[in-house]
Image: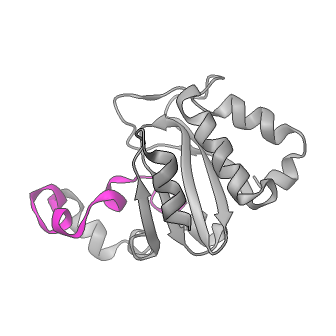
Amino acid sequence: MPARDLDSDFERLLVSFSAPERLDGAREIVKRAGRDSCALGLADLLDPDDEGLAAKEALPENTASFLLARVGELVVLELLSGPSAATYVFRGTPAAIGCDLAGIHFRRRGLSLTGAEANGPSGRPYRLALRRLEPLKRLRAATAARVIHDEGWGEALSRAIA
């Protein structure tokens, strides 16, 4: 849901849908993108992680919340709650990226594989999807950066969207 359609509820929902560990980062992304270039969403996870980050307000089981933000020519995906995941930066439009993310049901493992990993033993379970699943192929081709959540996240994000 685009932030402009949420009016004053955007900030409340951002806080409610975010795990406490992700809220400051989400606000930083919103600040860089501008509120009107952001959207919030919920996704049903078909392959949930064993452990994930809980939103401030409880979401249905196996549901993740996310922020999509357009920053210049880039689209930033931040999972606000649910599985632990990196921040992804894509080239493209929010509509196209969001459609392709929905097409892979927000499964990120295929996105996170390096070329060497994809061709090695850890990529074996994903090889067919990597070759045949068009949304995954488009997202991998559009990936500009994958920013790991650690103490250097803010600096790494700045470099990725510069």
Quadrant of the drawing holding the C terminus = bottom right
Queried whether the magenta region covers residue 23, the answer comes back as no
Provide the residue span drawn in magenta.
102-124
Counting from the top left corner in percent of width and height, residue 152 is at 43, 45
- The answer to whether residue 13 is left or right of residue 156 is right
Which residue is found at the position 21% from the left and 67% from the top?
Answer: 127
Name above or below for residue 115 compared with residue 23. below
Where residue 73 sits: x, y (%)? 63, 75
Q: Position of residue 102 (x, y in %)?
A: 54, 59
Residue at 32% over, 53% down? 109
* Quarter assignment of residue 55: top right
Query: Residue 93 placed where, x, y %?
Result: 63, 73
Q: Residue at 49% of width from left, 35% of height from top?
A: 82
Q: Is residue 109 magenta?
A: yes
Q: Residue 36 occupies which quadrant of the picture?
A: bottom right
What main secondary structure does the magenta stretch of the protein show? helix
At 62% from the left edge and 36% from the top edge, which residue is drawn? 24
Q: Nearer the viewer, residue 119 or 159?
A: 159
Q: Horizontally, is 87 left or right of 128 in the view?
A: right
